[in-house]
Structure formats: structure tokens, C-alpha cells
Amino acid sequence: MGLAGFLALAPLRADKPETPGGQQVVVSMAGFAPPRLTAKTGTDLTVTLVNPDSRFHTDGGGWHQFRVEALDLDVKIPPSSQRTVTLRALRAGTYVFYCDVCCGGKENPTMRGILEVTG
């Protein structure tokens, strides 16, 4: 079973994006991995969001979200897929991101993360 699961998720285990400043985040019913992202002030940050959960996930139908209110960003990631988003010319600050689609929503500590932008 372990090998079957490993092989089934192979398309979702992409290498880190080749774009400078790129980071990959897995969003699953277990939360965000990693739960902390970093970037430099004034640079672009490309984030590839990977959702390994299937449509049979009992809470939210397998959908997840990457929401950063302070940046007016709301990306929904369908089950068993990935989305890539580029945040342009970030300003210094600490930004909270979360998923409010399932698993207790943004009030669940595992469904929240931090984007730290420093000079």
C-alpha cells in the first residue's frame, strides 16, 4: 500500500519551482507544510501550492485554499492538483495565510501559516 500511495502522489511531488524566489507548499488536511515562508522586501515570490487530498476527503471535498487577506490573495486548489501564484514586489511585514475551506478553517492552528518579508 505504501508504494502505491507513493506512486499515486508522484505527479504532485514536483521539485521546487525553478523561478528565483520560488517555494513549494503542500496544503492538506494535515495543514500547511511548511507553515512558514520567507521572502526579501521588494522581490517577487513564486509559490507552488500542492494539494494531495482526493475529492473523497470528507471535509471540503478535497479542496484547499491559500488566503492572504493583507495581500488580497485568495487561491483555491482543487483536489489532487497544484496551483502556482507569484506575489510581486512584496513589502516588509508579517502576513498570515490560511485555509478556511475545511479542517476547522482558519481557527485551526495547522490551517494557518506565516509569510515573513524582511529587508
Image (cartoon, grey):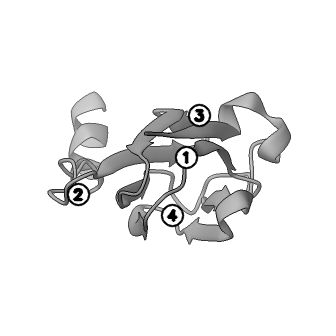
Numbered disc 3: secondary structure: loop
Query: Of the residues under marks 3 and 2, which one precedes in the sequence?
Result: 2
Among numbered discs 2 and 1, the one appearing first in the sequence: 2
Nearer the N terminus, badge 4 or badge 2?
2
- Circle on res. 92: 1
Marks 1 and 3, how far apart at CA: 29 Å
Judged from the image, the secondary structure of the residue bearing numbered disc 1 is loop
Give the x, y percent position of residue 21. 27, 51
Point out the tag, 1 or 3, that comes first from the N-terminus.
3
Q: CA distance from mark 2 to mark 1?
A: 34 Å
Which residue has dot 2 on it?
A: 11
Amino acid type at image mark 3: Ala
Name the foreground residue: 91 vs 107: 91
Residue type at mark 2: give it.
Pro
**C-alpha distance separating marks 4 and 2:** 13 Å
Q: Which of the two discs, 3 and 4, labels the residue nearer the N terminus?
A: 3
Which label was assigned to residue 79?
4
Q: Are marks 4 and 1 in contact (CB under 8 Å)?
A: no
